Image (spheres, rainbow, N blue to C red):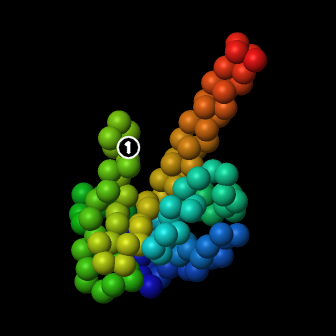
Amino acid sequence: MKCPACKRLLVEYSTPSCKIDICEDGCAGIWFDAGEFEQSKHYTVEFPRELLCVKKVLDVLIDRSKLRQCPRCDQKTMTRLVLDPETRLEIDQCPTCKGHWLDRGELAHIRREDEEITKLLERIEFHKKKLYG
Ligand SMILES: [Zn+2]
Ligand SMILES: [Zn+2]
């Protein structure tokens, strides 16, 4: 499969929960097949740390303003999915195969947010218990 952002070949990796494809020799984006992103976005799901912070090859430039083609279904244009309006975090989703493309650092960002929210909720629970027994 070719990278939808910089057209280099994607390299397949196995994580404990799924198989992903990484643009290791280029922009360091990650491809998730249908359902895999939903699993991997939670920080409680085991995900190899080194895959969260693959380095981008320096001279690779990507244009985020361009709509991209799905690497799985040839010539299908992916749509932008706004995950977080506040930080303007957008990922690409293929309307046909339901796969997701994440640019470098986006998964790490999403998982960290998930972690913060979970910790906050745990803290609130803890204080509630203290207050009301
Ligand atoms: Zn790439
Ligand atoms: Zn597709």
Q: Where, quadrant-wise, is the C terminus in this rendering?
A: top right
> Could you tell me how many numbered marks the image carries?
1
User: Residue 24 at x, y = what percent?
Assistant: 55, 72
Q: Amino acid at mark 1?
A: Asp
The residue drawn where x is 57% and y is 61% is 40
What residue do we see at 39% from left, 83% from top?
72
The kind of secondary structure element at disc 1 is: strand
How many C-alpha atoms fall within 10 Å of the one at disc 1: few (<14), some, or many (≥20)? Answer: few
**Eyeballing the image, is 97 above or below 84?**
below
Q: Which of 82 and 10 lies nearest the eye of the viewer?
A: 82
Which residue occupies the foreground of this view, 96 or 54?
96
Q: Residue at x 65, y 69 (%)?
A: 17
In the rendered image, which quarter is residue 50 located in? bottom right
90 shown above or below 93: above
Furthest residue to the top?
Answer: 131
Residue 81 location (% of width, % of height)? 32, 56
Q: From the viewer's perspective, is 54 left or right of 4?
A: right
Along the viewing direction, whichever of 76 and 61 lies nearer the viewer: 76
**Can you see residue 6?**
no
User: For disc 1, does the CB lie below 8 Å from ligand 1?
Assistant: no
Q: Tell me the residue at 60%/58% (across/down).
A: 52
95 with respect to 101 (left or right): left
The image quadrant that residue 7 belongs to is bottom left
Q: Is residue 61 visible?
A: yes
Residue receiving disc 1? 84
Q: Position of residue 1 (x, y in %)?
A: 44, 85
Please state the horizontal and vertical placement of residue 84, each as a whole percent of the image. Answer: 38, 43
